[in-house]
């Protein structure tokens, strides 16, 4: 019950910040995960990731907050802090992450699409392991106001 309450509060907080930032993005990271995020064009943004290519008994999601450095029409760089959660384990929190994200907009003709590269050190709570995770994917930003 505590896990469901925590998950509900986390999603509610995430959705409330997305209203203040306006734009929503959808990212498909290779075959490992999908993410829904707020506008990367603002100073602060957030993203909720779900790791989909896993056993249903090992369902994971991650909530990240980002500081977005000033970019241009071709690229953006972000540094964040996040927590990875497991719904089906005894302890809810799985690991702490520090994602470093480079977003590249390859074409100004289709400026809603971008390539995303993420490198994230992960510190697991239940072990002494420190992992270096990488993700790559394609991001679509709805209602993008980037200049063409």
Image (cartoon, rainbow, N blue to C red):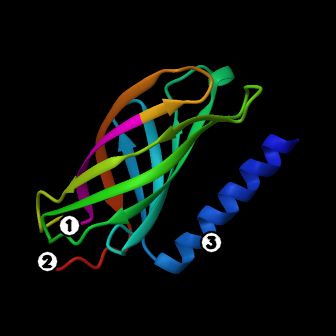
Residue occupying the point 44% across, 66% down: 45
Residue under label 1, please give it. Answer: 111
What SS does tag 1 mark?
Answer: loop
| Mark closer to the chain start, 3 or 1 | 3
Quarter in which the N terminus is drawn: top right
Q: In this view, does 104 lie above or below 3?
A: below
Question: Which residue extends farthest front?
Answer: 128
Residue under label 2, please give it. Answer: 148
| Mark 2 in CB contact with mark 1 (< 8 angstroms) | yes
Q: Where is residue 107 in the image (x, y as percent from the top left)?
A: 11, 61
Q: Is 68 displayed left or right of 54 in the figure?
A: left
Q: Is the magenta stretch mostly helix, strand or loop?
A: strand
| Mark 2 in CB contact with mark 3 (< 8 angstroms) | no
Kindly report which numbered mark, 3 or 1, lies closer to the viewer in this rendering.
3
| Mark 3 in CB contact with mark 1 (< 8 angstroms) | no
Residue occupying the point 73% across, 25% down: 89
Bounds of the magenta span? 111-121
| Mark closer to the chain start, 2 or 1 | 1
């Amino acid at each position: 019950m505590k896990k469901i309450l925590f998950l509900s509060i986390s999603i509610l907080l995430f959705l409330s910040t997305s209203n203040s930032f306006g734009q929503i993005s959808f990212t498909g990271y290779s075959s490992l995960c999908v993410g829904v995020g707020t506008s990367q064009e603002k100073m602060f943004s957030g993203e909720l990731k779900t790791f989909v290519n896993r056993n249903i008994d090992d369902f994971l999601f991650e909530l990240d907050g980002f500081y977005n450095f000033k970019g241009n029409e071709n690229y953006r760089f972000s540094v964040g802090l996040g927590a990875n959660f497991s719904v089906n384990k005894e302890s809810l929190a799985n690991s702490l992450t520090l994602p470093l994200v480079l977003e590249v907009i390859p074409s100004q003709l289709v400026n809603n699409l971008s390539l995303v590269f993420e490198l994230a050190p992960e510190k697991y709570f239940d072990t002494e392991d420190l992992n270096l995770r990488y993700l790559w994917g394609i991001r679509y930003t709805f209602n993008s106001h980037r200049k063409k």
